[in-house]
Amino acid sequence: QVQLVQSGAEVKKPGASLKVSCTASGYTFTSYYLLWVRQAPGQGLEWMGMINPTGGSTSYAQKFQGRVTMTRDTSTSTVYMELSSLRSEDTAVYYCARTQGHYYGMDVWGQGTTVTVSS
Amino acid sequence: QSVLTQPPSASGTPGQRVTISCSGSSSNIGSNTVNWYQQLPGTAPKLLIYNNNQRPSGVPDRFSGSKSGTSASLAISGLQSEDEADYYCSAWDDSLAVFGGGTKVTVL
């Protein structure tokens, strides 16, 4: 079946970097954009950016420009999200999701990766 | 502060109709389609409505969406206990996605 499986929970110290993976299966990897959305404890959803698995082009939310990097490995149908210079406010659940484009919504989501940033 | 504005809460008794509003601007809802997501406690969001009023396969027809100008709404008719969740609207704003702050629906 179609699924996105994310890497496990992480605990990081302030200033460190984070790399979360999202492996797709059950569909053609290059047919859907992959996006990253995070949710801080008790808060709403926040879009971080997206990657086109076909050519690797990316688009990032301005808030994360300079701190986030999204990459993909087509040989393993995996996308990665790296976030640097972590601070306590980055404590959140990070989700990957797929979409075919603007008209289609994010129809499949990963299970989420809990990231805790604490000294 | 979210780009799209939703009421923080809504409630109803079983069988009632509940409506959630989502207000945006000309650069997001006014120019693009709206999607709605349902998030049950402790789980990932689930796509409920896409392209303003389309339901993915498996979503009950109790859920419906509409859009007019720079606003959109989600209606839940025949409210059921399992509908108790957080609901988020979303739209594209140029090349980035924006969300509402979420509405917690309580079934009384």
Image: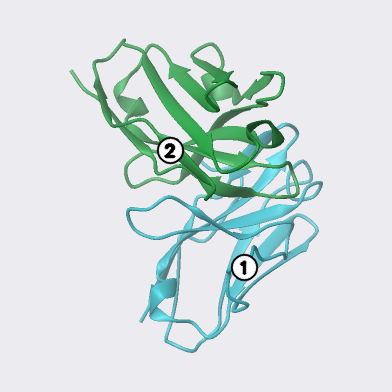
Chain colours: A green, B cyan
The relative height of residue B68 versus residue A37 in the rendered view (above or below) is below
Determine the CA span between mark 2 and mark 1: 29 Å
Q: Residue B26 at x, y = what percent? A: 79, 45
Could you tell me residue A59's position as x and y percent?
66, 23
- Report the residue at 78% width, 47% height from top: B32
Residue A40 position, x and y percent, is 37, 38
Please say if the residues under marks 2 and 1 sit with CB atoms less than 8 Å apart. Answer: no
> Mark 1: few, some, or many residues within 10 Å (few <14, many ≥20)?
many
Name the side, left or right, on which B52 lies relative to B20: right
Secondary structure found at label 1 = strand
What residue is pinned by disc 1? Answer: B74
Q: Nearer the viewer, mark 2 or mark 1?
A: 2
Subunit of mark 1? B
Image check: A90 left or right of B64?
left
Would you call the spot at circle 2 few (<14 residues within 10 Å), some (14-19), or many (20 or more)? some
- Mark 2 lies on a secondary structure that is strand
Residue type marked 1: Leu
Left or right of A67: which side holds B41?
left
Q: Identify the residue shown where x is 46% and y is 60%.
A: B8
On whether disc 2 and disc 1 are found on a single subunit, the reply is no
Q: Which corner quadrant of the image does residue A112 belong to? A: top left
Q: Amino acid at mark 2?
A: Val
For mark 2, what is the residue? A5
Furthest-left residue in this view: A119
Quarter of the view holding residue A27: top right
Up/down of A78 relative to B44, above or below: above
Query: Residue shown at 71%/50% (left/top)?
Result: A104
- Compare residues B71 and B32 and report the one nearer the observer: B32
Q: Judge left or right: residue B62 versus residue B81.
A: right
Q: Quadrant of the C terminus of chain B?
A: bottom left
Instruction: Chain letter for mark 2, please.
Output: A
Residue A33 lies, in percent from the top left, at 66, 34
